[in-house]
Image: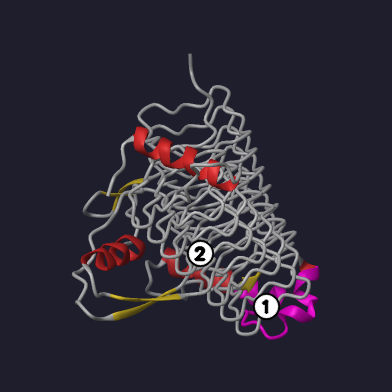
Amino acid sequence: MRLSPEALEAIIQLHERFLARKSGGRRALLSYTDLSACDLAGCDLSGADLTGARLRRANLAAAGLRRARLSLCDLRQANLDAADMTKADMRGSSFRGAEMNRSVLAHADLREAKLTLHEKRHAEILRSLREPLSEDGGDAETPPMPHGKSYDLRTDFTDAAMRGSNLEGADLRRADFTGAILEGANFAQAKLAGATFHSAVLTGAILRGADLEGADVSDAVLDPEALELAELAKATRSTPVVRSEGDITEALRQHALWLDSQGQEGARALLAKVDLSDRSLAKARLVMALLPGAKFHRTDLAQALLAMADLTSADLRDARLAGADLRGATLRRACFNAADLSGAKLGALIDVGAHHTDFPANGDRARFVGANLAGANLRRANLVGADFTNADLTGAQLQQAKLDGATFTGAKLDEANLDGASLRRVKGLPKTP
């Protein structure tokens, strides 16, 4: 059900009277209502019933949602910055790709929910919550939902931006934080058993007193001191593989042989989850190397050849990549925060092989917060949902790049070329006159 703007405004006004205990007030009952893309910024809907509501891309910035019923809601790509959801019931809801910076979810109920398909609207909710986002941010098709079948729905924060959010004491058992940006988030005393944090950024997060038994923090970006916390002792985490200098040198030598002989000699470099932090790998030949989840924290990779390499979920914070060649590389959810990528090539590798195939770099959901990308070439790159907050993109070439849902808050874009770039739902991009 879709309400007219006038009808929705009337409901909100009556709810505000209800909260103020004025005569004629009435609690907002908006369950199963389609409120997608509605502007509810600053509205006080505390205690409202929004069960199963569709709030995709809705603006709820600074909204009051204390003790609201928000279970099974579709809040994908919604703006919930600074919203107050204290003690709200949000079991099984989806916040995929939502903006939730400085939001308050203290003591909220965010456990998984069970949904049984007894009615058509139940199937519609399930389809809405489970359907994947396609590359351009739209919805992909999902198969039919059998009537009467039950589904367990985990609360989903995949790729949500939650910098500085307060989740103190919240029940987040089995919640999915894959790829979420949780810098400075407060998880003190939160219940996080069985939660998933694959590729999440947890630098500066407060984990004091949190229950992380069985939580999966594999590939999560954590502060070194956080790894020593007793709270993480019962979590599942991947320990970076440490290789000696000699082993790394030999792996690079074998990889060079593999490249030069077109696979007939040597061996392709397989360095998944290997800790290569603080090493000097300037001008290294790592074309087509397999490096998913590898750690390159503060590593010198200046002018390194990384074309077609797999750097999925790699940690490249503070790395030196000036002039590096990353054309056609897989950089999905890689973290380049504060890295030097000045003059680097992150665009498409063109006219490859007998079939003359082009391979654009895939930086889907990659993080470039505070990175130096001055003069970098990102032509035709897939940078959907990438985070360029406070990055320096002076003179960067972004022609025909896919930038849907990307964040440019505080970024320097002087003389950057965005001709032909796809810019749907971009955040923080300065408006041109």
Picture quarter containing residue 261?
bottom left
In the rendered image, residue 168, in percent from the top left (x then y), is placed at: 71, 65
What amino acid type is highlighted by mark number 2? Met
- Kind of element beneath mark 2: loop
User: Magenta residues?
Assistant: 225-250
What's the residue at 68%, 72% (across, down)?
A: 190
In magenta segment, residue 135: no
Residue found farthest to the top? 433
From this viewpoint, is residue 25 visible?
yes
- Mark 2 or 1: in front is 2
| Residue in the foreground of this view, choosing between 84 and 145 | 84
The answer to whether 61 is drawn above or below residue 311 in the figure is above
From this viewpoint, is residue 379 visible?
no
- Kind of element beneath mark 1: loop
Please indicate whether residue 302 sits to the left or right of residue 365 in the image.
right
Residue assigned mark 2: 90
What's the residue at 52%, 52% (across, down)?
A: 366
What amino acid type is highlighted by mark number 1? Arg
The answer to whether 338 is drawn above or below residue 191 in the figure is above
In the rendered image, residue 380, in percent from the top left (x then y), is placed at: 38, 40
| Residue in the foreground of this view, choosing between 237 and 22 | 22
Please indicate whether residue 71 sits to the left or right of residue 138 in the image.
right
For the residues marked 2 and 1, what is the alpha-carbon distance in whole angstroms? 44 Å
| Residue in the foreground of this view, choosing between 105 and 366 | 105
Please indicate whether residue 428 sits to the left or right of residue 115 in the image.
right
Q: Nearer the N terminus, badge 2 or badge 1?
A: 2
Residue assigned mark 1: 243
